[in-house]
Amino acid sequence: MKHKVFKVGIMSRTDYRKRTLAIARGEHAPKPGEPKIWFESLRSMSEVLSNDNQELLRMIVEKKPQSLAELEMLSGRNKGNLSRTLKTLERYGIVALHKTDHRLVPEVRATDFRVEFGIHSGG
C-alpha cells in the first residue's frame, strides 16, 4: 500500500476560527504545504492518534475488513466504542466510511503524519 502522508497542525480553536474566516473572506489562501488536519492541542492530537487508534488504523490497512462487524471481531473493541472512534477519525479525514450493500466499510486515508506547530499565536 502506498503511504498517504497528512500534515497535521496544532492551532488554538480561536486562531483556527480566525484562519477559517480569513480563508472565507479571501484574505488567506492556504499554501500547498499547509497542514490538512488541525488539532487544538497536542493533547487532542494524542487522544485521536493514540496507540490504540494507530493499531486500529494498521489493522484496517492490513486486514481490509469489509464491515464494522468484521472490524469489531478483529479488534476486540465493542461496537459503540469502535463506532465513536471511527466517526472521530472520519471527522479529521483520517478514515473514510463507505456504505456498501448496507454495510459500512472503513478505509484509511492517512497512514503517516507530519506534525507542525509553533509557540506564536496566529497563523
Image: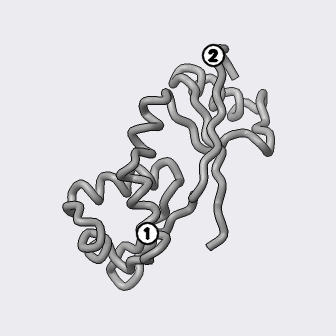
Toward the viewer: 2 or 35?
2
Spatial separation of the CA atoms under disc 2 and disc 1: 35 Å
Rate crowding at label 1 as few (under 14), some (14 to 19) or many (20 or more) other CA atoms within 10 Å.
many
Residue 5 picture location, percent across and down: 66, 54
Rate crowding at label 2 as few (under 14), some (14 to 19) or many (20 or more) other CA atoms within 10 Å.
few
Query: Residue visible at 60% across and 54% down?
Result: 112
Kindly identify which residue carries mark 2: 119
Could you tell which of marks 2 and 1 lies nearer the N-terminus? 1
Residue 66 picture location, percent across and down: 38, 80
Q: Is residue 20 left or right of residue 41?
A: right
Q: Quadrant of the N terminus?
A: bottom right
Toward the viewer: 113 or 69?
113
Dots 2 and 1: beta carbons under 8 Å? Answer: no
The amino acid sitting under disc 2 is Ile
Kindly identify which residue carries mark 1: 60
Residue 70 picture location, percent across and down: 29, 77
The amino acid sitting under disc 1 is Ile
Q: Quadrant of the C terminus?
A: top right
| SS at circle 1 | helix
- Residue 3 image-quadrant placement: bottom right
Query: Residue visible at 53% across and 22% down?
Result: 12
The correct choice, above or below, for 61 with respect to 18 in the image is below
The correct choice, above or below, for 46 with respect to 61 in the image is above
Query: Residue visible at 40% across and 74% down?
Result: 105
Residue 94 picture location, percent across and down: 52, 55
